[in-house]
Image: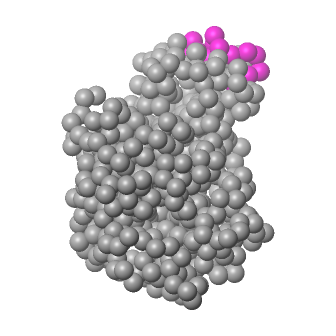
Amino acid sequence: MNHTPNALHDTATVIDCLEISNWSESVFQQMRQGGLTAVNCTCSILENFRQTIKNIAWWQKAFNTYPGLIMPVHDTADIRAAKRLNKTGIILGFQNTSAIEDDLDLLGVFHQLGVRVMQLTYMEGNLSGQGCLERFDAGLTNFGKEVIEEMNRLGILIDLSHVGNQTALEAITHSRRPVALTHANPKSLCDHPRNKPDEVIKAVAENGGVVGATIFPPFLPKGNRSALADFIDVIDYMVNMIGIDHVAVGTDFTEGQPREWFDWILTGRSKKGPALQLQHPLVNPKGIQSAADFPNITAALLERGYDELQIRKIMGENMMRIFSQVWKNQGTSSDMASPVSYHHLISRLKLTSEQRLMLDSIPMVLFPRWFFVSIKKQIEKQSDLETARKIYYQAGWEGAVKWTQKHIETEGLSGRALLEQYMNSAGLRGWGKLTIAEYDEQAPRAVIHLTHSAVAEEMGDVGRTVCDHLPGSIAGAFQTILTTSGGSSKKIIGRETKCLANGDDKCVFEITAVD
């Protein structure tokens, strides 16, 4: 598609991985002017439990005070809703685990209150591990390991932006889910103690995570003299280092914050004053001085030579992927694929640019038959059969969610009619005839039959299921339909109970909820 910068920005899901401004109506208006779909907004840095609760209470009041500008985000469906409603979704996030004090159970309390992103440590060490300004970094504590395990269980994204390097590496290894650097630049590009060494950045990406490039002046080579082009240089540098699927935007905007506030966050528990000296007054890069300037990033990426798909990933879709993998209500069944294995393996496949574009942008169930066959062969050469099947399931799920959300927004379809259109589209690609045998949004349950499938017949061996992506694909579409219609919030999974490849007269896919 040939979009103008403004048209592309207007249709993209735009996410700022972190802002920590002095929150006000004017800041929220700037977010809307900039077309921001969602923002990770810091509501705890050095505060304890009680102080953080007061901050969250402020946000609850803000949602009621500015309902035309902002709305709370608890899952990716809320982010999509914010896009449709022309509001900015607010993701509550912490830049420290100080608020849970020494009580692991408080993580669950904050999750119930809507917190979806949490940084392990700030500049200093805490009970979880070490911060980036500590003299020594001994890594994760035993308590820190339990914190990570509980965050994984609850569905809270782990942020390592201010975390010490050894602690960060151990956290990446210990986490069962992808992690993020929501606002950090490469230390090899700008030698600042808060920037991250290449080793940490690469480790985040290798485990399926995302790194948000930041405009914060001290973290850029030219400091207060920086311009938008210097920020795009950071994005270029990281794309070349870790790939287009792992880079995002995390501005770290501090709009309206006074000098005293900076001194407070940089002092911590010390009695000696700020641990870092900043060149006040801080000047954001020319061209991206507030959230209202976000369209300039899209225009600059186009000018730099990025295509539409790549820009959509950087501006928000990479973060949507990691949110969907970490936040609980977006998951698949426990015996399905680790999302990390899917993206990690796909990034290693030797594909042409055309193949990669198709794989990234088109639901697997809508692939032409010849393309699916070629991709399937490549995947199975590089992995065992069970891993490959899990990859197909997850690829089917993610593609179906994107397709279904798009058609809800553009065509207004819903329910059974939407699922039928999705399956008809698959039938036109040569997959065979897909029909709905049962459909019940209240149960919730759907049963789908596949007949006349040349793919299943020609690709399968006796005793093997070859349609692994279809259960995931239909489950992803059904889950999105339910979420959008306000139906069941239960987790939906799909499984194949009959297959043409096994000699059955048809493939049967059962789509049901799990507790």
User: Looking at the image, can residue 225 be seen?
Assistant: yes
Q: Is residue 193 magenta?
A: no
Q: Is residue 49 above or below residue 89?
A: below
User: Looking at the image, can residue 408 be seen?
Assistant: no
Q: Position of residue 125 (x, y in %)?
A: 66, 74
Coloured how? Answer: one colour
Q: In the image, is 375 to the left or to the right of 184? A: right
Q: Is residue 461 magenta?
A: yes
Q: Which residue is found at the position 30% from the left and 75% from the top?
A: 256
Q: Position of residue 339 (x, y in %)?
A: 61, 43
Q: Position of residue 158 (x, y in %)?
A: 59, 60
Q: Is residue 420 above or below residue 52?
A: above
Q: Which residue is found at the position 74% from the left and 31% from the top?
A: 386
Q: Position of residue 416 (x, y in %)?
A: 41, 39
Residue 393 quadrant: top right
Residue 104 quadrant: bottom right
Magenta span: 452-465
Q: Which residue is found at the position 46% from the left and 73% from the top?
A: 277
Q: In the image, is 367 to the left or to the right of 255? A: right
Q: How many marks?
A: 0
Q: Which residue is found at the position 47% from the left and 82% from the top?
A: 264
Residue 419 quadrant: top left
Q: Quadrant of the C terminus?
A: bottom right
Closer to the camera, 99 or 368? 99
Q: In the image, is 304 to the left or to the right of 20? A: left
